Amino acid sequence: MHDQAEGAVTAGEAVTAPGRRLGRLWSRLERWRGTPFAVDLVTAAGCFVLMSLDIPGLARADNALSGATATIVLAAGSATLLLRRREPWGPWLPYLVGLVFLGWLHDVTLTQFALYSVARYRGRGSGILACCGYLVWACAAYALFEWPAYRGGESVSQFLALAVPIGVLATGVGIAARRIDLVRALEAKGAETALLQAVQQERSDVAGDVHDFVGRELTMLSVRAEVLSRRARGERWEQDFDELSETARRAHLLLNEIVVRRGSGGGTPTPGLDALPRLAEESAAAGNTITVDVDDAARAQSPLRQAAVYRVVQECLTNAAKHAPDQPVTVTVSVAANRLHVTVTNPLPPTAPTTAPVSAGTGTAGMEERVLSLGGTFEAGPGDGTTYEVKATFPART
């Protein structure tokens, strides 16, 4: 029985092994697809396929190439496209090889790919220079190397009508692609800058809240210590109260110095949980129905935690008004297992808004930064596919 079971397992593994290998291969291909080298490889293969259509003609022509030799030469020329973005001179190598093919084999395919590559990866000036060089060399090749009539027409005008559009079009497409690359890079850089600014702003707001809330507690501690010191005049612990008051005062001064040095500005502190009903009323004016449920245990949390909860809820209600208008929003704040939980949910709208909402896309990053700065966790995204849910947790003060 044991041998039979073991044999069955071995047979099952043999059957599923090719599937597992195929799955691993597919995952590798997924990671490799879209990489610069993959694009260059596909480009080189496409160039070779287009040129290989002329191998029978090259073998018949008087250029000392057989079918096998022509295949090797064309494959080597296409392979130069793999270097077009690896080195500063990378696009120029297929360009020079393409000019050789132009005069020797009367083939312009590689030159087209090379002109595009020079314009895209070396810029507009290099592309225009390469295109002018190609046109001059094409005219010389037509005049000096006995260009076949079936390749470019029986007259110079017919040849130029073929050669000029090929070079100009390839160069123009390369310049346009480079501009698209630059625009995408600028958009990505702008988004990254906006995200960093949002995170920095949130850190400044947190610093301001720390200054206002903690500074107040330190001031009260210093005043209380002074009162106790006056009451303990002549007692042996009078000096201890004086030292405690001085320590609190120094801590407050240090806190002020740090916050001012980091540019907090010392604005109005962020409201706490008591301000959530008023926030819900203001948000309801935008069309959303807001339901707020706050545990009594949550109201006993520190002002910093309450301020963080307020900011999270405020941003969630703003996002709901933008992306899910007229949808009900449920806000739940509770304490369980020594954790302060904040959950904001709303149904996904059945249809997208008619006008795109004005959004910088940095609000979620600001929420996450504030939650993480207090040692919490943050999640945001579609829940079960029909609702959008934001969850934030903080260590709760027992």
Image (cartoon, rainbow, N blue to C red):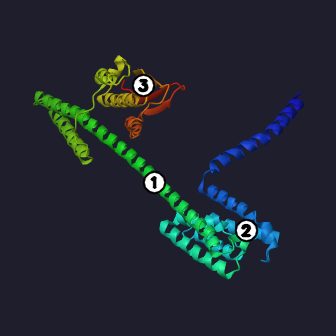
Q: Gap in Å between the C-alphas at discs 2 and 1?
A: 35 Å
Q: Gap in Å between the C-alphas at discs 2 and 3?
A: 62 Å
- CB under 8 Å between discs 2 and 1: no
Horizontally, residue 136 falls left or right of residue 74, namely left
Which badge, 2 or 1, comes first in the chain's sequence? 2
Question: Which residue does the numbered mark 3 point to in the structure image?
Answer: 344
Callout 2 environment at 10 Å: few (<14), some (14 to 19), or many (20+)?
A: many
Q: Residue at x 44, y 33 (%)?
A: 377
Report the amino acid beneath label 1. Val
Question: Which residue does the numbered mark 2 point to in the structure image?
Answer: 74
**Element assignment for label 2:** helix
Horizontally, residue 23 falls left or right of residue 331, namely right
Question: Which residue does the numbered mark 1 point to in the structure image?
Answer: 183
Q: Position of residue 4 (x, y in %)?
A: 89, 30
Which badge, 1 or 3, comes first in the chain's sequence? 1
**Element assignment for label 3:** strand
The reply to whether residue 11 is in sight is yes
Number of marks in picture: 3
Which badge, 2 or 3, comes first in the chain's sequence? 2
Q: Position of residue 331 (x, y in %)?
A: 40, 22
Q: Residue at x 56, y 68 (%)?
A: 87
Q: Position of residue 300 (x, y in %)?
A: 32, 22
Residue 343: which numbered mark, if any?
none
Query: Taking 227 as reference, is 78 above or below it?
Result: below
